[in-house]
Image (cartoon, grey):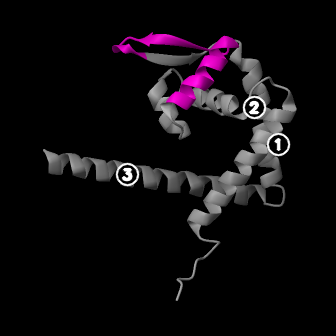
Amino acid sequence: MSAAIDPNSFGFLITDLSRLIRAEMDRRISEAGLGLTPGESRTLAHAARAGVVRQNVLAERIGIEAMTLSTYVDRLEAKGLVERVPDPDDRRAKLVRLTEAASDALGGVNSAAASIRADASASIDPADWATLLGLLRQARDNLAEARAAQSRAREETDA
C-alpha cells in the first residue's frame, strides 16, 4: 500500500513554482540578447542581492558548487560585469563585487523577472499578491530561524 502524496502541499507547490520560474527565466534571458547565459544571469542577480561577498558564500546562496560558480564568475569578469577583490579579513579568499557595467545587464535581468512576476500575478488581486509575498517571507524567515536554532543546539552539544 502506498502513502498518499498531496501534489498541492507546500513543498510541492514551492518546488513547482521554482522550477517553472527558473525555466521561464532561462528562456527569457536567452531571448533577451543580453549576452549572458542563464547561469551567469543568476550569478549576477545573486551578487547584486548579496553585495560584496565571498565566492563560497555566493555559491551556497545560489545553491551551486563552488567550481560552477567560479566558471560563471570567470565569464562575468571577462565581460567586465564583476571583479574579484582580496578579502581584507582573509588574504586567501576573494570577494566578488559588481562593476558599474553590470547595471545594464541587471536591468535586462530585472526586466525579465518583472515580466514573469506580472504573468504569475495576472489573475490575483494586488492585495492578495502582497499578502502572499508577506507570507512567503515569513515562511522563509521561520525556516531560516529553525535552521539557525538547530545549528546553535548542535554547537552547545558539541561544546
Instruction: Look at the numbered discs 2 and 3 and tell me whether their residues touch, using CB distance below 8 Å.
Output: no
Q: Residues under labels 2 and 1: Cα distance?
A: 10 Å
Instruction: Name the quadrant containing residue 2.
Output: bottom right
Q: Earlier in the sequence, mark 2 or mark 1?
A: 2
Residue type highlighted by circle 2: Val
Whether residue 33 is in magenta: the answer is: no
Q: Tell me: 1 left or right of 89.
A: right
Q: Residues under labels 3 and 1: Cα distance?
A: 33 Å
Instruction: Name the quadrant containing residue 111.
Output: top right
Q: Residues under labels 2 and 3: Cα distance?
A: 30 Å
Q: Quick one: SS at disc 1?
A: helix
Q: Quick one: SS at disc 3?
A: helix
Measured from the top left, where is residue 92 in percent x and y? 36, 14
User: Which disc is residue 43 wearing?
Assistant: none
Measured from the top left, where is residue 23 in percent x and y? 75, 47
Stretch of the chain drawn in magenta: 67-93
Q: Residues within 10 Å of mark 1 (few under 14, many from 20)?
A: few
Q: Residue at x 77, y 26 (%)?
A: 107
Give the residue pinned by disc 2.
109
Give the residue pinned by disc 3.
147
Q: Earlier in the sequence, mark 2 or mark 3?
A: 2
**Residue 130 seen from this side:** no
Q: Is residue 73 above or below residue 37?
A: above
Q: Residue at x 81, y 41 (%)?
A: 27
Q: Is residue 56 above or below residue 19?
A: above
Give the residue pinned by disc 1.
115
